[in-house]
Image (cartoon, helix red, strand yellow):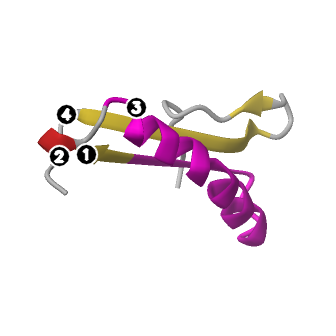
Amino acid sequence: MDPEDDPVGELAQLAQDLQPVLDEAARAAHAPAATLAFRRGDEVADLATGTLNLHAGIEATPDSLFQI
């Protein structure tokens, strides 16, 4: 499908559908947090899951920076 034919909100719906997949993938990998971003045409969707800082209880966001 051409990105120009993409109805508004289709990517947002895909992001909602993928949130449980990201949640489970992070759990399965024993990762405290994870983020995912993807783009279709000019539309961008991003997701986050988990806790960025376990001691402070800070939740991960799509803008979180991870020290590797």
**Residue 61 sits above or below residue 20 on the image:** above
Q: Residues within 10 Å of mark 4 (few under 14, many from 20)?
A: few
What amino acid is found at the position of numbered circle 1 in the picture? Answer: Arg
Of circles 2 and 1, the one toward us is: 2
Reading the image, the residue beneath label 2 is 3
Q: Residues within 10 Å of mark 3 (few under 14, many from 20)?
A: few
Reading the image, the residue beneath label 4 is 42
**Residue 26 sits above or below residue 10 on the image:** below
What amino acid is found at the position of numbered circle 4 in the picture? Answer: Asp
Q: Rounded to the nearest whole Å, what is the CA distance between mark 3 and mark 2?
A: 12 Å
Reading the image, the residue beneath label 1 is 40
Q: Rounded to the nearest whole Å, what is the CA distance between mark 2 and mark 4?
A: 8 Å
Residue 55 rendering spot, x and y as whole percentages: 86, 35
User: Mark 2 or mark 1, which has the lower sequence index?
Assistant: 2
User: Mark 4 or mark 3, which has the lower sequence index?
Assistant: 3
User: Mark 2 or mark 4, which has the lower sequence index?
Assistant: 2
- Mark 3 and mark 2 in contact? Answer it, CB < 8 Å: no
* Magenta-colored segment: predominant secondary structure: helix
Residue at x-position 68% and y-position 44%: 49
What amino acid is found at the position of numbered circle 2 in the picture? Answer: Pro
Residue 45 rendering spot, x and y as whole percentages: 41, 38
Looking at the rendering, in which quadrant would you find the N terminus? bottom left
Which label number is shown at residue 9?
3
At numbered mark 2, what does the secondary structure look like: helix, strand or loop? helix
Asked if the stretch drawn in magenta spans residue 23, the answer is yes
Q: Rounded to the nearest whole Å, what is the CA distance between mark 2 and mark 1?
A: 6 Å
**Residue 67 sits above or below residue 44 on the image:** below
- Mark 2 and mark 4 in contact? Answer it, CB < 8 Å: yes
Q: Rounded to the nearest whole Å, what is the CA distance between mark 1 and mark 3?
A: 11 Å
**Residue 60 sits above or below residue 18 on the image:** above
